Amino acid sequence: MSDERLVGREAELAALDLAADQLAEGDPARPLVLLLEGEPGIGKTALWQHALRRLRQRGVRLLVCRMGERESNLSFAGLTDLVGAVPDAVLGGLPAPQRRALDAALLRAAPDGAPPDPRAVNLATLTVVRLLAAAGPVVLAVDDAQWCDPATADALRFVVRRIGREPVGLLATMRTSGAGARPSPAWLDASVDADRVRRVALGPLSPAELYRLIRARTVLRPAKPDLLRLAGASAGNPLFALELARTVARAGWPDPTARLPVPTTVTGAVAATVAGMPEQSRETLLIAAALRHPTTAMIRAALELPGSVTPGLAAAEESGMVEVRDGRVGFTHPLYASAVYSSAATERRRAVHARLAGVVTDLDQRAWHLALAGDGPDAGVATVLAEAARQTQARGAPAMAAELWRLAVHRTTPGDPRASEWAVSGAECLFSAGDADGARDVLDRAVAELPAGHARARALLWLGSILFYQGSPRDAVAALRRAIPEAVGDPLLTGMLHLRVSWFADYDTDLRVNAARQSQRLLPASAGAELRACATIAGEYFGFLAGRGIDVGNLEAGWAMLPERDFSWEVEWARSMFHLWAKSFDIHRGRAGWLTKYERAYEIGDEPAVPHALLHLVEIECWLGNLDLAARYVAEMAVTNDQTGQRRWRGQTLYATALVAAIRWAPDDAVAAAREGLALAEELPDAVAAALHLSVLGYVELSRGAAEAADAYLTRAAHLVAEMGMREPARYTFFADQVEAALLLGDVERATGLTADLGERAARSPYPYLVGMAARSRALVALAVGDLDAAAAAAQAAVGACAAGPLALELARGQLVQGIVLRRRRERRAARQALTAAQVSFTRLGAVPWAARAAAELQALGLRPSSSTGLTPAEQRVADLVARGRTNDEVAAALFLSPRTVESHLHRIYPKLGVRSRTELARVVSGQP
């Protein structure tokens, strides 16, 4: 269609041209999404095609798909069109996991191992768009966006939410249902800024504009009264008016006193045109309308006709309803396909679908045609639908797979035992697709209807998993334990149930250990290495948390059994547990493991896993003293959590925020975040998170010197940990703070008992953090009772363990205690060295109260400031004057130095004192926080 035939759309054309120019020129004011909205037949597709021509002329790369109502039932139907024409050279730039997932989704390759995560397909789509955008502007163009299949809609949503200032846009048409209705496509949600979405609403044409359109597109030349009748009947809808004009051109105008005999909808008007065509053309058009990508060859195959001539197609093409190019048949407007299909009788449509089931080659399309060819029970059709569901699930389209499983269940014959199995498979797919509520409804019904046995046990397995992620670990474990006796006789299923009990029972560590051990015992060799490895790692790690020590050799053997590439729940849980162990025993290995998990989550698009990895990276970087990096991770956690909407992880994000703020001494921010997170944890309830928030609140109060408040918070945290049965709660690091708070309150007896517990834990599981905290606590208790020799030995052990860690804040706190002990022993030089090191470290970390304590202890030594800071006499004189607010020139004049020499002194002074500004220098020199 040429642009001259776009009548009465001058304003809309101007808006489209402007958007095309903005995109091609990289204008920052360009829209991200341009929506053409209007009722059926109003002209959206014509304008959309005009915009595509304009964009091509400007050199913009187009990824195009035209959706249809029936295509909404085919997995990745739209994405196949959008990405199908992308050159292999571009696809070769994808990371391997993304390329494998995309190839499997688009049926370019069979799935390799476990089904690809749908998020990997989405991320691959985003990467393709960004690779293309690196070479120039890109537009994803979608006609009739309301018919996008769920898998394509997910991919588009993923792309739209993450495109920033790249030269990328999305042009779509969207059907509205009536005046005032402004729906958005499924892939466009509130996360996209409103100012980046431009809507172009198409209204009715005026009578004069309709006249120009009718003259250009038909042989009719209506007089003014007839034109007004036609405009009134069509309500200004151009396609409706054209179909009425063609009807009148064939049959003539009715009596002026009579109303035009018109249908009430555009589809009805088109159907009237279809009804007037030869029978042969109607049959050909119906077959084309029922196909995803109709070709002349497929139509002839469905008609069982030899040769190269397709009967009735020429007449359909002459009517303007279809175009035929290179053997491909396309409707010139989506409404034509809908009208042709809907105007056929039900039995006629079913007969066509039955024929097409024997023509199409794709399994999912064959399954859909078979599903539409009948409605009653049919074991053969049900089997094909189930096979298609498995294939679609393997392609990484769980939403479409869930629908196929549902259809398979619907078509089973009464009493077919496969129905319940397929219903559970469908629920699993719904859960993977993000519809936990829908999956739970299916599973609740399955559990209620199924008799006791393996099928119901499998349903309970998935129901328990859903209950855990919806925030109820106890309910999850109850469902799993209910299933265990029903799974007797199936060691794989029973082993899986015990394994998930061990995962989810975070409120009862002994139960986790016993369940993991049972899983190890039950899982058969045929279960595969990854399942047995997961059970092995779970048994060792949960045994470690229960205070039973750990067999590192057995743990490492389990790690070696894990596949490097495959993605599955079991593998990801096992990797996480191993990284948690390494985080305590080998912090650099743990850091590398969590970084790998974080990078992999981004590589495959597994956004819900990103905050989990970042949380542990935040803690690790805080321990190592890299607070700038920890703060960047916290910011990323917050953004990712907002995108994924995980309520439980919001609490963890608040904990990470509070932790960094507390160490950097922004106490108001730390307390606000920790209190909000604690309230959320108590509401869920989530004892794991609650104890973390209490530990931060306790640290803040201890840093302030508010021993009573600190002790209250830390005692509550300790009770929560004890209730969870964690006799080795390596996840929590507040126990030495609890000892210190008790000593500040004068409760030496309780502090001694707490210290003894730390010592017993360190003897069983001697990892650096625990050894250092136990030793520092021993030093403080010994100091409290006056045993300076024991205190000195313990303080030295604490410093050694934390330095080996290396644990920055805890090392500085150990040096502070060591300096205090040495001052009491009158070893002033050694005390000065320890306290100076502590003060410099505290200052570098921003731990203001602790730096002030170190400064106060240095002053108590009675030495000159130069001795306490490690500065030379000349450097000390410069530092004193700068601390009083003197400029470099004033300092130079007072000390008879050149300004350059003053600058050189300052370059040495700053790193010695661990400061970054003149303000911080003044605070350190004055001994103030």
Image: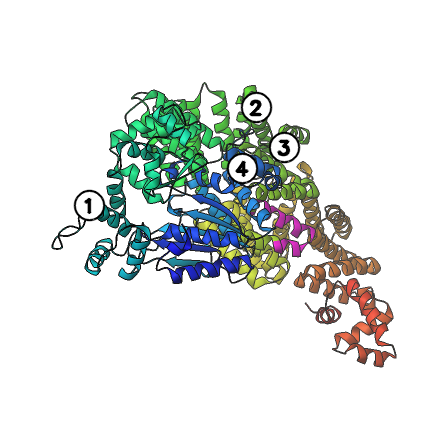
Q: Is residue 637 visible?
A: yes
Q: Which residue is mark 4?
A: 102
Which numbered disc, 1 or 3, marks the residue that appears first in the sequence?
1
Q: Residue at x 58, y 59 (%)?
A: 701
Please state which of residues 906 and 250 is positioned toward the viewer in this rendering.
250
Q: Amino acid at mark 4?
A: Leu
Which numbered disc, 2 or 4, marks the residue that appears first in the sequence?
4
Mark 1 to mark 3 CA distance (whole Å): 72 Å
Residue 531 belongs to magenta span: no
Mark number for residue 564?
3
Q: Is residue 606 visible?
A: no
Q: Helix or strand or loop: what does disc 3 sit on?
A: loop
Q: Nearer the viewer, mark 3 or mark 4?
A: 4
Q: Residues within 10 Å of mark 2 (few under 14, many from 20)?
A: few
Mark number for residue 528?
2
Mark 1 to mark 2 CA distance (whole Å): 73 Å
Instruction: State which region is magenta.
Output: 611-632
Q: Amino acid at mark 3?
A: Glu
Q: Give the image location of residue 869, x and y in percent.
A: 80, 65
The reply, left or right, for residue 835 in relation to residue 648 is right
Asked if the residue at tag 2 contacts the one at tag 3, i.e. Cβ–Cβ closer than 8 Å, the answer is no
Q: Helix or strand or loop: what does disc 1 sit on?
A: helix
Q: Residues within 10 Å of mark 1 (few under 14, many from 20)?
A: few
Q: Residues within 10 Å of mark 3 (few under 14, many from 20)?
A: few
Please state which of residues 684 and 95 is positioned toward the viewer in this rendering.
95
Asked if the residue at tag 3 contacts the one at tag 1, i.e. Cβ–Cβ closer than 8 Å, the answer is no
Asked if the residue at tag 4 contacts the one at tag 3, i.e. Cβ–Cβ closer than 8 Å, the answer is no
Q: Residue at x 49, y 36 (%)?
A: 504
Q: Residues within 10 Å of mark 4 (few under 14, many from 20)?
A: many
Q: Nearer the viewer, mark 4 or mark 1?
A: 1
Mark 2 to mark 4 CA distance (whole Å): 26 Å
Asked if the residue at tag 2 contacts the one at tag 1, i.e. Cβ–Cβ closer than 8 Å, the answer is no
